[in-house]
Amino acid sequence: MTCDDVRRLLHPFVDTELPPPMLLAVARHAGSCLACDAALRELTELREALVGAVDRRLETLDLGGVWTGVSQAIDRHETRVHRDARVRRLAVWGPTLALAAGVALAVGLWNGWTSGGVPRPGPTPSRVAGGEPPARVAPRPPATMVARDGLRNRAAFDRLWGRGIEVKREPKAGTTVVWVAHVDDSVE
Amino acid sequence: MGPSDWELVQQSRGGDRDAFRTLVERYQRKVAALALGMLRNPEDALDVVQDTFAKAYQSLDRFKGDAAFYTWVYRIAVNLCIDVQRREAKMPQVGLELREGEDGAEQDLPAAVAHGADPEDPFRRARDAEIARGIQQAVSELTPEHRAVILLREVEGLSYEEISRVLDCPKGTVMSRLHYARKQLQERLRGLR
């Protein structure tokens, strides 16, 4: 093996990347050749200087807090991932829920409208320009069931019969109930 | 003997923080050495170490196990270092020389010399410190790719094959980059002697 051959193999030699027979051949040559041995030593010194410089700097570095920093970074990341997942879920379900709410509102309004529960828009009395104020309508009494304590006998019933007043006996209550179709003071 | 890297990765994937902590503590020094070699500022290096493992944890599902865990982590670290260097390159380098002066002789002294036969010899200390500073300066003048190759080989002791995986480049490229980087550093070293 010549010096030129060895020089080409010096780098893989110091990196132990050569197959064993070649490693041995280079080592034998360097052992007997001062120039190649010097070149080999130069490479080794370079490595030592590099490793030494990095090691010295490494000693000044406090690695005690690395895990704490990593752990906090992981926590931040997981919080962000969960938040993003919530936002994504909302992005998927949000429009659907909004649509459903809109439909429900529309159906509710329509039902209210058609059943008369919701007043139809129109001019209110105060808006009628120049008109008389609307007459106050007395509240109409509902069909009333009135109990009359004084109508306890048949004669009284007969007297009322035929006057547009229907008289019924309510046996279970033991009282007589007079059904009137309208309010009539003469009943009293 | 503790659990293998792969076992710890599997446990970490299941949410076991302690398993991942073991991985961090197993490799934080190696990653720190690489980051310190790649970056001048120790604070930046420390940030890169933390970011490397945080990113590794977030990407554990992507780790297939076909390569060693540490080569995968080195890959993340190298990429983060390159990002930091690119950011630094866009910023003015004010105060860099001052920092070097502060660290000075003590920090840049090679360990081999510091623990050598006569560490108290002031002339030798001064000369070796100068050599170390010179090498450090020369390393910082290499391209990030060349710097990564030389550090992964000389400091981390990775094989050509592993370096090619970390840097995602052919083995031949690793060899040529390594040759070039060594040549540059040797020239600087010769000038200092």
Image (spheres, coloured by chain):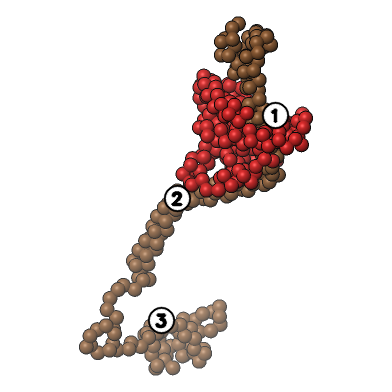
Chain colours: A brown, B red
Asked if badge 1 and badge 2 are on a common chain, one would say no
Coordinates of residue B127 in the picture (x, y in percent): 67, 34
Q: What residue type is labelled 3?
A: Ala
What is the spatial separation of the Cα atoms under label 1 and label 3, in whole angstroms? 92 Å
Q: Residue B174 carries which label?
A: none
What crowding class fits label 2: few (fewer than 14 Cα within 10 Å), some (14-19), or many (20 or more)? Answer: few
Towards the viewer: B191 or A119: B191
Q: Residue at x 39, y 93 (%)?
A: A186
What crowding class fits label 3: few (fewer than 14 Cα within 10 Å), some (14-19), or many (20 or more)? Answer: few
Choose mark 1 or mark 2, whichever is in front: 1
Q: Mark 2 lies on which chain?
A: A
Residue B10 lies, with reference to residue A19, above or below; the image says below
The residue at which mark 3 appears reads as A143
The residue at which mark 2 appears reads as A91
What is the spatial separation of the Cα atoms under label 3 and label 2, in whole angstroms? 57 Å
Q: Which amino acid does label 1 sit on?
A: Ser
Compared across the picture, whether A89 is left or right of A122 comes to right
Q: Mark 1 lies on which chain?
A: B
Asked if residue A166 can be seen in this view, the reply is no
- Whichever of labels 3 and 2 marks the residue nearer the N terminus, that label is 2
Q: Which residue is drawn at 31% across and 72% down?
A: A120
Residue A82 lies, with reference to residue B36, above or below; the image says below
